[in-house]
């Protein structure tokens, strides 16, 4: 289940990056680069911070293949995505849920404190999107009013609470992912926002 979620998250973020780049009318090479950094940016930063080098995608070409497939699918079906923003949002939300879990698990595997694990999960989920938005000259979603990184933190808390119940790992991963995805969908649907801070 964990490996499957990893592949789904990588594909989702690659498609999210490709759709953003196409929306900015980049050439095919530019679209592929944005797809690539969106999919592996957060994980690369996480691996460097925990001293896991070479980073994950350099040791397993499967990730490169998955990103390439996501890139090709986004191009082939770009006209099917009538609502580009909706498609981008859905892929980004799936990636958010899955990559939070991956960061949490990496932290647990090397014995880090739960708070640091949650920080790693949030970073893994958000920073590919931050790099994508910066390269596409957008204000990163994480810095806007929209609830984004906060959902990853909530997902991390839910993960550690459920882990105390000794649930099967597959159930634990699936439940946490669904909580993150569901809360993000509801936040957008019901327009939940964090308050902005203004200097007066």
Image (tube, rainbow, N blue to C red):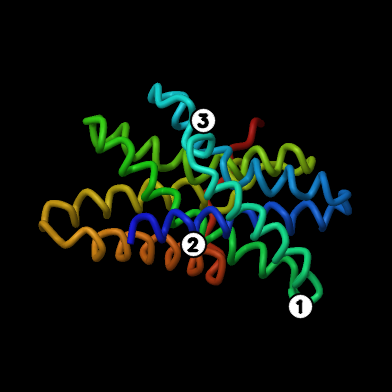
Q: Residue at x 66, y 68 (%)?
A: 87
The quarter of the image holding the C terminus is top right
Q: What residue do we see at 31% from left, 35% from top?
A: 107
Query: Which badge, 2 or 3, is on the more N-terminal residue?
Result: 3
Mark pair 2, 3: CA separation = 24 Å
Residue 136 got which mark? none
Distance from the alpha carbon under mark 2 to that under mark 1: 24 Å
Which-is-in-front pick, marks 2 and 1? Answer: 1
Q: Label 2: few (<14), some or many (≥20) within 10 Å?
A: many
User: Residue, x 45% and y 24% (percent of image)?
Assistant: 53
Badge 3: residue crowd in 10 Å (few <14, some 14–19, many ≥20): some
Point out the image quarter for the N terminus.
bottom left
* Residue identifier under label 2: 184
Across and down, in percent, residue 119 comes to 38, 36
Which residue in the protein does label 3 denote?
A: 45
Residue 6 appears left or right of 72: left
Q: Of helix, strand and loop, which one carries label 3?
A: helix
User: What percent of the width, then of the height, locates residue 129?
Assistant: 61, 45
- The residue at the point 48 percent across, 36 percent down is 59
Relative image position of residue 122 (x, y in whole percent): 44, 42
Q: Residue 197: x and y, percent?
A: 58, 38
Q: Residues within 10 Å of mark 1 (few under 14, many from 20)?
A: few
Secondary structure found at label 1:
loop
**Mark 1 highlights which residue?**
80
Left/right of residue 170 with respect to residue 121 in the rendered view: left
Instruction: Write down the quadrant of residue 23 in the picture.
Output: bottom right
């Amino acid at each position: 289940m964990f490996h499957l979620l990893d592949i789904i998250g990588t594909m989702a973020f690659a498609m999210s990056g490709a759709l953003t780049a196409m929306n900015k009318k980049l050439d095919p090479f530019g679209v592929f680069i944005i797809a690539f950094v969106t999919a592996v940016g957060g994980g690369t930063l996480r691996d460097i911070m925990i001293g896991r080098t070479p980073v994950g995608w350099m040791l397993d070409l499967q990730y490169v293949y998955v990103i390439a497939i996501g890139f090709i699918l986004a191009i082939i079906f770009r006209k099917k995505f009538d609502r580009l923003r909706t498609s981008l949002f859905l892929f980004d939300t799936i990636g958010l849920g899955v990559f939070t879990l991956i960061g949490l698990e990496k932290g647990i595997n090397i014995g880090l404190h739960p708070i640091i694990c949650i920080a790693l999960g949030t970073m893994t989920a958000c920073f590919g999107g931050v790099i994508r938005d910066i390269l596409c000259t957008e204000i990163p979603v994480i810095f806007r009013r929209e609830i984004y990184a906060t959902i990853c933190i909530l997902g991390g808390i839910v993960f550690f609470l459920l882990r105390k119940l000794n649930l099967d790992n597959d159930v634990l991963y699936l439940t946490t992912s669904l909580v993150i995805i569901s809360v993000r969908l509801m936040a957008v649907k019901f327009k939940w926002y964090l308050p902005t801070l203004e200097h007066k």
